[in-house]
Amino acid sequence: MVKPLDIAQASSKEELSRLLVKLRLRSDFKANAKGITESIVDGFSVDEIEALPESTLVHIADSYFIMSRKGVSDQDIFNKIELQRSLLGEDKPVPENMNLSKYIKLRFKSDFPQMALVDEMVINVEILYAVTWFSRDLKSKYTWESANTYASKVFAVMKKRFEDSQAVPVVSEPASEKEYEVVVEEVIEDEVEDEVEAVNESPVNKWVLYILIIAVLGGLLGYWLLYMDGLVYIQKYLS
């Protein structure tokens, strides 16, 4: 039985990031089948966790909720975050009509191209858990129960996809040697019958047969005329 990830009990942003990394690995059934499991995350240092996409997600969500509580609009929040990034030479214009989820996915796309290999449903689960964690002291519509329910559904879909991809097509058992011989004989007989029919239907072969018949009849007629007094009979008949 896999131990549930109790993200609600994360005591710090670093621990939240670590648990989200585990969640992503848990959803990667192909990697799990190769022995790459979430347990490897326990050995990651703080710096290694900080370099992963989930830390970026957590930092964005943290900044978002801090400024949102102060009444800053979503667009201004993302512009301020980008202004901070511009100090590092990473300034990029923020499209209009952004929300937190869209902005996080935009950052994943630009900063972590490898996340394109992660199903968007899994990213949605990570964002939902982060939002739930940061809004836990607010009267929010996001609850741990709804987050866990959604995550369970996503994991079930991912598992089903993996199992379907690993399914081997059902192949019927090979016939016995005797059955194989019968099948071969039937094929040979069919081919021979087809060849015979083709010969019989060929107009060239019919003419050859007619010539042979005429030649045989001509030979018999010559033998009768020369050796059986055929000419005598003909002369008597004509006289």
Image: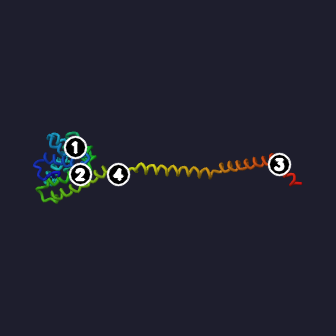
SS of the residue under disc 3: loop
Q: Is residue 235 left or right of residue 65?
A: right
The amino acid marked with disc number 2 is Val
Query: At 28% from the left edge and 46% from the top edge, which residue is drawn?
Result: 117
Where residue 77 sits in the image (x, y, percent)?
19, 50
Where residue 157 sits in the image (x, y, percent)?
26, 55
Where residue 238 sits in the image (x, y, percent)?
87, 54
Q: Which of marks 2 and 4 is in front?
A: 4
Query: At 75% from the left edge and 47% from the top edge, which residue is drawn?
Result: 219
Among the two numbered marks 3 and 1 on one chain, the one whose residue lies closer to the N terminus: 1
Q: In which quarter of the image is the C terminus?
A: bottom right
Q: Nearer the viewer, residue 76 or 236?
A: 236
Rate crowding at label 1 as few (under 14), some (14 to 19) or many (20 or more) other CA atoms within 10 Å.
some
Q: Mark 2 points at which residue?
A: 122
Which residue is outermost to the right?
A: 239
The amino acid marked with disc number 3 is Asp
Among the two numbered marks 2 and 4 on one chain, the one whose residue lies closer to the N terminus: 2
Q: Is label 3 in contact with label 1 (beta carbons under 8 Å)?
A: no
| Label ID, residue 229 | 3
CA–CA distance in space, label 2 to label 4: 28 Å
| Label ID, residue 146 | none
Q: In this view, does 214 lie to the left or right of 99?
A: right
The amino acid marked with disc number 1 is Ile
Q: Which of marks 2 and 1 is in front?
A: 1
| Label ID, residue 169 | 4
Q: Which of marks 1 and 4 is in front?
A: 4
SS of the residue under disc 1: loop
CA–CA distance in space, label 4 to label 3: 84 Å
Among the two numbered marks 2 and 1 on one chain, the one whose residue lies closer to the N terminus: 1
Among the two numbered marks 4 and 3 on one chain, the one whose residue lies closer to the N terminus: 4
| Label ID, residue 36 | 1
SS of the residue under disc 4: loop
